[in-house]
Image: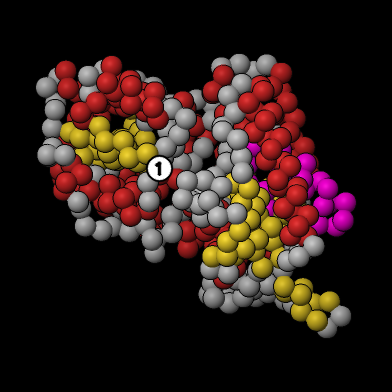
Amino acid sequence: MLIDRNRVGFTIKEGITLVMGGRAKPRRVLIIVENLPVPFDRRVWMEATTLQQAGYHVSIICPVGKGFEARRETLDGIHIYRHPLPREGNGLFGYIAEYGAALFWELWLALRIAFTRGFDVIHACNPPDLIFLVAAVFRLFGKKFLFDHHDLCPELFETKFGNRGPQYKAMVLAERLTFGLASVSIATNESYRQIAIERGHMPPDRVFVVRSGPNLDKVKPGPAVPALKQGKPLLVGYVGVIGRQEGLDLLVEAAAWLRAQGRAALHYGIVGGGPELEAIKAYASAQGVADLFTFTGRAPDALLMDMLNTADICVNPDRVDAMNDLSTMNKIMEYMALGKPIVQFEVKEGRFSAGDSSLYAKPNDPVDFARKIAELADDPAKRAEMGAFGFRRVHDHLGWEHERPKLLAAYDAVFS
């Protein structure tokens, strides 16, 4: 069928069928994601629901996780197949166990889906860059492969382990093979698109930028919950994974410096779990600021939204490194969607997303980070001005409603 590209209504089910012998055949998609359960992975869920609302038949393979233990579930018409997974790998043998188990389950469930619901394309969400091994099996039978590039896995390895040894080189090879097998690649920003073209050797017209804009129907301003401030005048909010590269230790050091300067009017609400959570709690105690922090661990969306809506300042202490400099962080745009002023370190894509809604500290300098927090704490008018800028930018340019047509265009390219 011909598609009128001038139409803008998302409810029009553009390109949802292939005409074969006079019969309409729905497009069928299998999304595979390893590192987070769905629908907890908000980007993957927005992609899945966008496709389902456009008439696609969508299946998902993902791991189980806290609050998402059901091995088989159907939500909003999307069929979810979850599998067990060992604890996050730490070292060579840990990664072999984790990735080996994931690949086994992904292949097994993909075969099961192929003989039941069926699929025409595998949509692989990294990390890791190994799902192409599952897709390669089905490419032999004419299935298409779309690579959804969420993370720079070689740079992530370098950030975690500080070297470019054999494992790093193996990850570069896996990334190259992934791009080589893909019919189409989706990048989360222009930096990732350039990597797909230059390092992955993909044709530019087969690489589509689909940013992780927040769903503004769900991420929206709401009432504050004063009790979350724990008696302090101001709350500093953070949401996200707590790992080595997320820099929560730098935030703890910033809080300790502010306390030493007599700036004790701040409480810090930290929403999220991860492999470094307990270490960060211990570090806050060692720095004498544990009483200034609330760590919720992985929390339901309601608590996450309450914390962010209550926050006066939101922070992203991600370290400046090869990965974070080029990556778009979901939390930045969620902060902006709620009209919150932001403090982060100077990173390329973070500045592109936030613009004037953020202050930018010197790379990996916790004292300068603390000074930026203090600057906003002392200036309510500036906080309001910055928050209003971010709110407008997300609603006018970066919300998911602006990314939906780009995702559907990428799928039109897959099926063209």
Instruction: Name the image colouring.
Output: secondary structure
Residue drawn at x 68%, y 53% is 123
Q: Is residue 313 left or right of residue 43?
A: left
* Rendered view: 277 above or below 396: above
Task: Give x and y (percent) for residue 354.
Answer: 38, 43
- Where does label 1 land, which residue? 298
* Rendered view: 180 above or below 309: above
Per the rendered image, the range of residues in magenta is: 123-144
- Mark 1, Cα crowd under 10 Å, few <14 / some 14-19 / many 20+, is some
Task: Give x and y (percent) for residue 111.
Answer: 78, 54
Task: Give x and y (percent) for residue 416.
Answer: 77, 64
Residue drawn at x 13%, y 32% is 265
* Rendered view: 82 above or below 13: above
Q: How many marks?
A: 1
Specify the quadrant that holds the N terminus: bottom right
Q: Is residue 356 magenta?
A: no
- Residue type at numbered disc 1: Arg
- Along the line of sight, which residue is nearer the eye, 250 or 69? 69
Q: Is residue 277 left or right of residue 165?
A: left
Secondary structure beneath label 1: loop
Residue drawn at x 40%, y 48% is 333
